Amino acid sequence: MGQTQPGRMSSSDSAVDVGSTICGSESSFTGCEKHGYDLTLTDKVIAATGPNAHPRLAQIMPSLVRHLHDFAREVSLTVDDWNAAVDLLNACGKMSDNKRNEIQLLCDILGLETLVDEITANIVASASATGSATPSAILGPFYRDDAPLLPNGSSIVRNLSPSVSWYENAIADSAFITGRVLSSASPPTPIRNAIVDVWHSAPNGLYEQQDPEQPDMNLRGRFKTDEEGKFAFYCLRPVAYPIPDDGPAGQFLAMLDRHPYRPGHIHFLVSAPEHRTLTTQIFDDRDEYIAKDSVFAVKDELIVNFVPREGDEKAKWFLEYDFVLDTVA
């Protein structure tokens, strides 16, 4: 996106007077007519949808087309701009695989995934009898299916030794996390055999699929709750890290002159039969980026405080945290 392809104007070659072509205000119709825009085009595109269209698409596409067309008119979107956007999306698609989702990362940068998460959470909460479920947060681009199912009390830190470059950091931030998975029914009841899927980055700020020095599935694991709904595992306190700049999403962020950092966080995907699956994150309160997350995912209810752990040679820090799941009607 940063390079102009042959035959295309660069953004520096043409200046556009955006203010004179706004097509979303009270004067939009006059402004669009003045510049010769075909104002019937939008209606033609919407009307082209057939009677057997997918119901949800038939519902949302008219609004999408109108907003998209109005945006293009408002900013006087040029062929150069459009080609750059297509190149960005194509580059994101080419970089995405089952280990990294670059388009999802782009959505995170734009705050879209956080907004969609909020909308969905509000819909679920309005249908919930209690509204007491743990708040959700975005999935993020580095989730992987089929993390190993581990016994409660085991560690998701794999092959840690003094030869690892971040060994000392890992020892200093070694942590033990435990808690329960509860149903939002009143009163809250423990959920047996719920699955707690957890993953986080290493002290160098990289997830295992980004780092060839880390073993496969490092800092990932799934745990099944016991009779009392309890889970427990060893991990590391999370650290802040920058959104990767080796791909188009990170380059796009730099073009916006925005900082790339996410506060230290741990991802969770918690599921149980007859309950809504919870996708969320917890955020370490020591982190300076809590108030300025580059993907806008922090919620006050998800900020946690690790405390020193005594009498455990495998962990210097401790956290107890319960997850509450909504029941499915």
Image: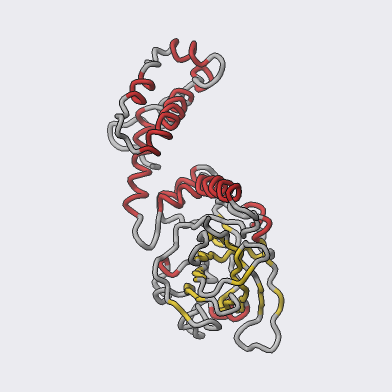
Please provide percent x and percent y for residue 318.
66, 77
Please provide percent x and percent y for residue 210.
42, 65
The quadrant holding residue 234 is bottom right
Please provide percent x and percent y for residue 312.
65, 88
Q: From the viewer's side, name the closer residue of 202 and 29.
A: 29
**Left or right position of 88 against 128:** left
Q: Is residue 313 above or below residue 254?
A: below
Residue under the image location 62 percent in, 62 percent down? 184
Residue under the image location 37 percent in, 37 percent down? 55
Residue under the image location 50 percent in, 22 percent down? 18
| Residue 170 visible somewhere in the drawing | no
Please provide percent x and percent y for residue 217.
42, 73
Residue under the image location 46 percent in, 25 percent down? 70
Total count of labels: 0
**Left or right position of 25 against 187:** left
Q: In this view, does 164 lie above or below 81?
A: below
**Left or right position of 125 against 83:** right
Q: From the viewer's side, name the closer residue of 209 and 7.
A: 209
Q: Is residue 196 above or below residue 123?
A: below
